[in-house]
Amino acid sequence: TQLLEQSPQFLSIQEGENLTVYCNSSSVFSSLQWYRQEPGEGPVLLVTVVTGGEVKKLKRLTFQFGDARKDSSLHITAAQPGDTGLYLCAGASKTSGTYKYIFGTGTRLKVLA
Amino acid sequence: ETGVTQTPRHLVMGMTNKKSLKCEQHLGHNAMYWYKQSAKKPLELMFVYNFKEQTENNSVPSRFSPECPNSSHLFLHLHTLQPEDSALYLCASSRGTGSNEQFFGPGTRLTVL
């Protein structure tokens, strides 16, 4: 069974702190997405990474795709209360000739003012 | 109206009721999805439709019955549900099933009494 493990599962930090969320798998992904979900809403796409080693920046968020395309990280600099939410990674990998798109286990982030 | 909309946003039903969830996408996408999101579980893919045709049924019990009359609309018909079916039901769309970037609706919070 393919699995995308995210760590940590929960994170509560003070405003202004930095943090990193990890997304790991034993499968190779053709691309990987990061989403943020706020309470009462659906996930919103943040970024797509495609190339091994790729780094993308979105304001204070930095996303990196592992060289082997099996893992990814999300780093937030100077976190703000508006960053609070559930962060989900997701990716498509090929198994037995079929692409399966799976979501990670999620990291629930709370940023305190 | 833009994006992906879902109605109702909240639904409470008894185990003998029949109800339907509705999803509409205004993005010109060809693929639509139903997901179930329960507490402490990763997002679970239920059904995939591509150009109105069902391409994936992830071993979902028959008490959940999807309908896709066209590429913009997706329904989930519910009958004789169980309390453990209480969850957030999310609809998503993408350009095609080969496109990994999915756009989600706000979800329907379902409670089965």
Image: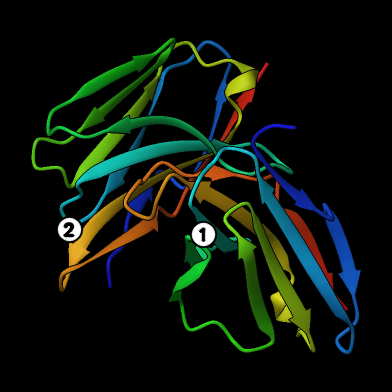
- Where residue B65 appears, x then y in whole percent? 66, 80
Residue under disc 2 on the same chain as residue under disc 1: no
Question: What subunit carries mark 1?
Answer: B
- Which numbered dot is residue B43? 1
Res B105 visible: yes
Determine whether label 2 and label 1 are within 8 Å by CB.
no
Label 2 crowd (10 A; few <14 / some 14-19 / many >=20):
few
User: What residue is drawn where x is 64% and y is 39%?
Assistant: B26
Label 1 crowd (10 A; few <14 / some 14-19 / many >=20):
many
- On screen, residue A11 versus residue B39, left or right, reads left
Nearer to us of marks 2 and 1 is 1
- On screen, residue A27 versus residue B21, left or right, reads left
User: What residue is drawn where x is 36% and y is 39%?
Assistant: A33
Q: Secondary structure at mark 1?
A: loop
- Which numbered dot is residue B17? none
- On screen, residue B80 versus residue A61, left or right, reads right
User: What residue is drawn where x is 22% and y is 21%?
Assistant: A55
What residue is shown with label 2? A26
Question: What subunit carries mark 2?
Answer: A
Distance between mark 2 and mark 1 Cα atoms: 19 Å
- Which amino acid type corresponds to the residue marked 1 in the rendered image? Leu
Q: Secondary structure at mark 2?
A: loop
Quadrant including the N terminus of chain B: top right
* In front of the other: A79 or B50: B50
- Which amino acid type corresponds to the residue marked 2 in the rendered image? Ser
* In front of the other: A56 or B5: B5
- Where residue B8 appears, x then y in whole percent? 84, 55
Colour scheme in the image?
A: rainbow
